[in-house]
Image (cartoon, helix red, strand yellow):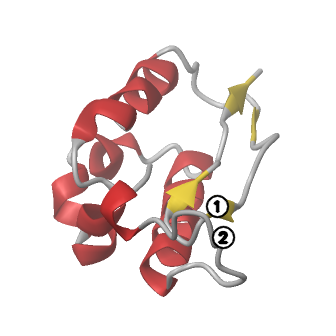
């Protein structure tokens, strides 16, 4: 997820926007809980989601990945963190 209009081009903020951090944490919790409905209907997740996903083109691939997950299958996050204040680098690995 990312918000390019909020990205700190060239300066790489030391701190990430609160909404970006909150949404990445919420996303991680929903993924670990295997609670896919809110992830599919991400517009119901509030303002943090809407700021993090201003357009769905970089979010929708996550839905394809979780659609391949089997119930109870191990899930991990090999890459985490937010760049430039608004671009989540969160990667999801299944299996």
Residue sitting at x 25%, y 52%? 42
Residue sitting at x 50%, y 85%? 18
Disc with the residue nearer the chain's start (1 vs 2): 2
Q: Residue furthest right?
A: 78
Residue 3 versus residue 63: which sits nearer the camera?
3
Residue 88 versus residue 45: which sits nearer the camera?
88
**Label 2 residue SS:** loop
* Above or below: residue 49 compared with residue 94: below
Q: Quadrant of residue 75?
A: top right
Around disc 1, counting alpha carbons within 10 Å, would you say few (fewer than 14), some (14 to 19), or many (20 or more)? some
* Above or below: residue 68 compared with residue 10: above
Residue sitting at x 41%, y 19%? 64
- Per the rendering, the mark at residue 12 is 2
The image quadrant where one finds the C terminus is top right
Judge from the rendering whether residue 33 lies leftward or rightward of residue 91; answer left or right.
Answer: left
Which residue is disc 1 drawn over?
Answer: 83
Q: Quadrant of residue 93?
A: top right
How far across and down, in percent of the image, does residue 74 sit?
Answer: 76, 32
How far across and down, in percent of the image, does residue 81 sit?
Answer: 71, 60
* Above or below: residue 72 compared with residue 34: above
Judge from the rendering whether residue 6 lies leftward or rightward of residue 14; answer left or right.
Answer: left
Q: Mark 1 near mark 2, Cβ–Cβ under 8 Å?
A: yes
**Label 1 residue SS:** strand
């Amino acid at each position: 997820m990312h918000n390019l209009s909020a990205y700190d081009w060239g300066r790489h903020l030391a701190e990430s926007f609160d909404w970006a951090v909150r949404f990445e944490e919420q996303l991680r919790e929903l993924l670990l809980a295997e609670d896919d409905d809110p992830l599919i209907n991400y517009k119901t997740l509030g303002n943090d989601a809407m700021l993090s996903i201003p357009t769905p083109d970089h979010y929708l691939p996550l839905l394809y990945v979780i659609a391949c997950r089997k119930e109870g299958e191990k899930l991990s996050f090999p890459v985490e963190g937010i760049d430039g204040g608004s671009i989540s680098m969160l990667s999801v690995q299944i299996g």
